[in-house]
Amino acid sequence: MSLNREDVLKIAHLARLGVADAEVERYADELSNILALVDRMNAVDTSAVVPMAHPLDGTQRLRPDVVKEIDQREAFQKIAPAVSDGLYLVPKVIE
């Protein structure tokens, strides 16, 4: 399918897009190329392809949930500027 100047201007109007007169022909060519690609994709025989209900139906391989780091809470709280009852104290930033 090939688009002409009037088709591009009508599409631009429907999409509420401003298109410069100098670029209408370029847009017509690019949109025509996209439509040609869609036509080629529609021509492919997909009768043997099983449709997917959702692309994320497959299961993800998960790593084992194993602790790899040691607990350094006490060391970090010793060097913190202000701590109270195991919590870091910070200046109030919202009034």
Image (tube, rainbow, N blue to C red):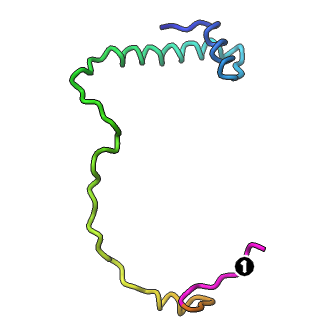
| Residue stretch in magenta | 86-95
Q: Percent from the top left, x then y, of residue 19?
A: 69, 19
Residue 76 placement (x, y as % from top left): 50, 87
- Using the image as rendered, state which of residue 8 and residue 55 is in the foreground: 55
Q: Is residue 57 above or below residue 95?
A: above
Please state which of residues 8 and 57 is positioned toward the viewer in this rendering. Answer: 57
Image height of 71 relative to 10, above or below: below
Q: In front here: 33 or 95?
A: 95
The answer to whether residue 79 is magenta is: no
Q: Amino acid at mark 1?
A: Lys
Q: How many marks overall?
A: 1
For label 1, the residue is: 92
Quick check: is 93 in the magenta stretch?
A: yes
Q: Main secondary structure of the magenta part?
A: loop
Q: Residue at x 29, y 53 (%)?
A: 60
> Which of the 4 quarters of the picture holds residue 14?
top right
**Spot occupied by residue 73 in the image (x, y as percentages of width and height):** 46, 87
Q: Quadrant of residue 46?
A: top left
Q: Residue at x 63, y 16 (%)?
A: 11
- How packed mark 1 is, by other alpha carbons closer than 10 Å (few <14, some 14-19, many 20 or more), is few
Residue shown at the point (51%, 13%) measured from the top left: 32
Q: Residue furthest left?
A: 48
Residue 5, percent from left and from top: 63, 7
Helix, strand or loop status at disc 1: loop
Q: Which residue is depicted at the point 26% across and 17% down?
A: 45
Image quarter where the C terminus lies is bottom right
Picture quadrant where residue 85 is located: bottom right
Residue furthest out toward the right: 95
Viewer-nearest residue: 28 or 9: 9
> Vertical placement of 52 versus 22: above or below?
below
